[in-house]
Amino acid sequence: MNAVTETKECKPLDLATLRANPELYFEDETVTLERLKQAVEAENDSFNYDLSKDKSRKEIISFSRQCSTLKTAVDAAGKERVAVIKEKANAVDTRRKAMREYLDEQRDARRKPLTDWEEQEEARIASHRAIIEDMIQSGYVGFNESPESIQQRIDKIAAVDVSEAALQEFAENAASKKAAILQSLNTHLQQARHNEEQALKLQQLEAEKAEQEQLAVEEREKREVEDAMRREEEEQRLTAEREKAEAERIEREKAEAATKAAEDAKREAEENAKREREQLLKQQEEAAAKRKADEEAKRQAEEARAANLKHREALNQEAQKAIMAAGKIGDERASKIVQAIAAGSVPHVSIKY
């Protein structure tokens, strides 16, 4: 048997057969992934191509697509096989679930009498333990708790029935705890009453002390009022003296200010008169200087006009002589021509002075 298996595994895997029947990958145990790798790599080694040729490039595409086609076919066959397995598994799970539910119901039904008894027993024990626990909790006395409150705890615990008929197997323990708790509460009650008496005495002492302190406060306040009145009278006297001194100072400063104001007014009037005299003198000097400058300017202007007139007459005489010579005209006509030119009556003709 082993020899036959080894022979099949050594035989190369036929990819064409696997492509035609992809279920073989799951049905035939000899069709392993290792043999598939060997077959694919053998095809790879035997495939030749020439990238310079279009046909060869298309053959590469087709050759690579064979892997995708085989993958899709084998994977689809595997999915169908898994779907069948899941359907069978679901049917088994349904029967298992029904079986479990039925047998669980039968187990609970068979045990129900014992379960009911256990629940009742648990409730009974819990009730008895709760009674004992409540006594224990009631036995805890709070800080500075009043005697009335402790007495209420004692009355409550004393009323608890700890007989065997009431608490069965817990009766002995409950009776022991009840006695111990009542003893403790009675001790606390005596101490609380003693504390209350001491507190009343202390309260009386504090009231007396407070009354004495109040009398001391009232006496101190009375002295403080008297001292305040004396201080106020002294302050009023000092204030009156200060106000009088201040009024005298103000009157003195007013008199000094009036005297100083009169002196300042006199000095200012003298300074103003001096400034007015100086201003008037300055104005007179400036007016004289201006008259002198105006006269000098007028003189210079007259001299300039006279010189200009003399210069113009000389040029006009030269022009008149030139016109007379050029036009062979008399002195009077030449003079009128020059006068017309000088007046600007002759267009495009002028004398350059």
Image (cartoon, rainbow, N blue to C red):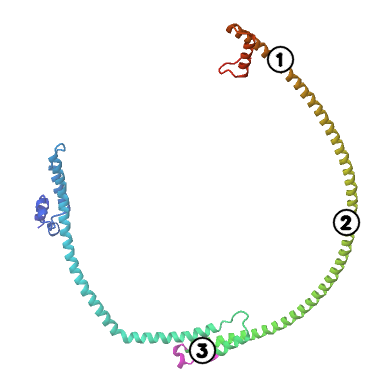
Mark 1 crowdedness (10 Å alpha carbons): few <14, some 14-19, many ≥20: few
Instruction: Using the rendered image of the protein, determine whether residue 14 is visible from the camera's viewpoint.
Output: no
Q: Amino acid at mark 2?
A: Glu
Mark 3 crowdedness (10 Å alpha carbons): few <14, some 14-19, many ≥20: some
Q: Secondary structure at mark 1?
A: helix
**Residue 14: percent from the left, percent from the top?**
10, 51
Instruction: Using the rendered image of the protein, determine whether residue 309 is visible from the camera's viewpoint.
Output: yes
Q: Secondary structure at mark 2?
A: helix
Does 167 appear in magenta?
A: yes
Task: Examine the rendered structure and indicate whether residue 248 appears above or below residue 194.
Answer: above
Foreground disc of the pair 2, 3: 2
Which residue lies under the disc numbered 3?
175
Q: What is the quadrant of the N terminus in the image?
A: bottom left
**Residue 127: percent from the left, percent from the top?**
45, 86
Q: Residue at x 81, y 27 (%)?
A: 288
In the rendered view, does 159 fall on the left or right side of 89?
right
Which residue lies under the disc numbered 2?
246
Q: Secondary structure at mark 3?
A: helix
Give the residues in magenta.
Answer: 157-170
Q: Residue at x 57, y 90 (%)?
A: 155
Q: Main secondary structure of the magenta part?
A: helix
Task: Examine the rendered structure and indicate whether residue 336 appears above or below residue 219.
Answer: above
In the rendered view, does 35 fall on the left or right side of 244?
left
Which residue lies under the disc numbered 1?
307
* The quadrant where residue 344 appears: top right
